[in-house]
Image: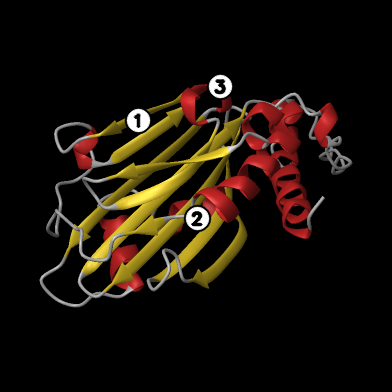
Amino acid sequence: MSDARAALLFAATASLALLAPLAGCGGAPPPPARAPAPSTSQRPWGAFTDAELSRYHSQRIGVSFPLPDRPAWSISDSDERSGGWLVAKHLRSSTTLRARRWDSSRPVTRLDCEAHAREIGELPKAVEIDKRFETLSDENVSAPRGWEARQWVATESTPDGRVVGHVFLFTARRRACLIVHAQTEAASEVGYGELADRLELLSSRVVGGIMAEPEASPLTLPPPPLP
């Protein structure tokens, strides 16, 4: 197990453990963190995390992503649907990837793109992040290559006991902004190890493996709010 996966598993487990006292009325302390997930050969979710990666290319927004278990993804990639977002869903793993790209009338930085993501509601507001989100990693990266980007990986605890994993990428080049948001979830503690594996795959190979055509950016800032 890699160091990155170990950190993701520990943080995801800790986030969910905090919800345990809310489930009962006795105020019992949260359970201790569980042991690392079983080996690959014992993992029932390996069909997703161990599947061969196959790249999907969007000519419309000029980006491509490597996707595991590619035939099982449904992809909406149209200006007329989903508010113009590219939306890819893998139902068996409760995973969704969203991406959108815009032009600006002036040079932009990744901070501009991040502010724009918050403005349109794709990135939660700071007060919501403080209440519900646990940061796993937060770093400046060059993704796609030659772009200025921030990648933020976090878990979100929900009142009904689920934990949702998020990978956000806010990236800029010249006058173009690209926002990517991958989301996956586990319904119970049985999915702790699965969630950690998915987050590592999404952050390091799917979102981390994004490629872009530098001149392709068909939309103009600002876009309409999310539906």
Measuring from the top left, give residue 47's x and y in whole percent. Answer: 66, 27
Measuring from the top left, give residue 51's x and y in whole percent. Answer: 63, 34
- In the drawing, does residue 151 fall left or right of residue 63? right
- Residue appearing at x 75%, y 56% in the figure: 7
On screen, residue 79 above or below 207: above
Q: Which mark is residue 209?
A: 2
Label 3: which secondary element: helix
On screen, residue 150 above or below 222: below
- Residue appearing at x 21%, y 45% in the figure: 60
Distance CA(mark 3)–CA(mark 2): 22 Å
Which residue is tagged 1? 75
Residue 123 visible in this rendered orientation of the protein: no
Label 2: which secondary element: loop
Mark nearer the N terminus (3 vs 2): 3
Which residue is tagged 3? 92
Say few, some or many: other residues with alpha carbon within 10 Å of mark 3 (under 14 / 14 to 19 / 20 or more).
Answer: few
- Residue appearing at x 24%, y 50% in the figure: 61
Label 1: which secondary element: strand
Distance CA(mark 1)–CA(mark 3): 14 Å
Measuring from the top left, give residue 122's x and y in whole percent. Answer: 34, 48
Mark nearer the N terminus (1 vs 3): 1
Q: Nearer the viewer, residue 102 or 210?
A: 210
On screen, residue 178 above or below 28: below
Amino acid type at circle 1 is Ile
- In the drawing, does residue 111 fall left or right of residue 203? left
Amino acid type at circle 3 is Arg
Distance CA(mark 2)–CA(mark 1): 18 Å
- The quadrant of the rendering that contains the C terminus is top left
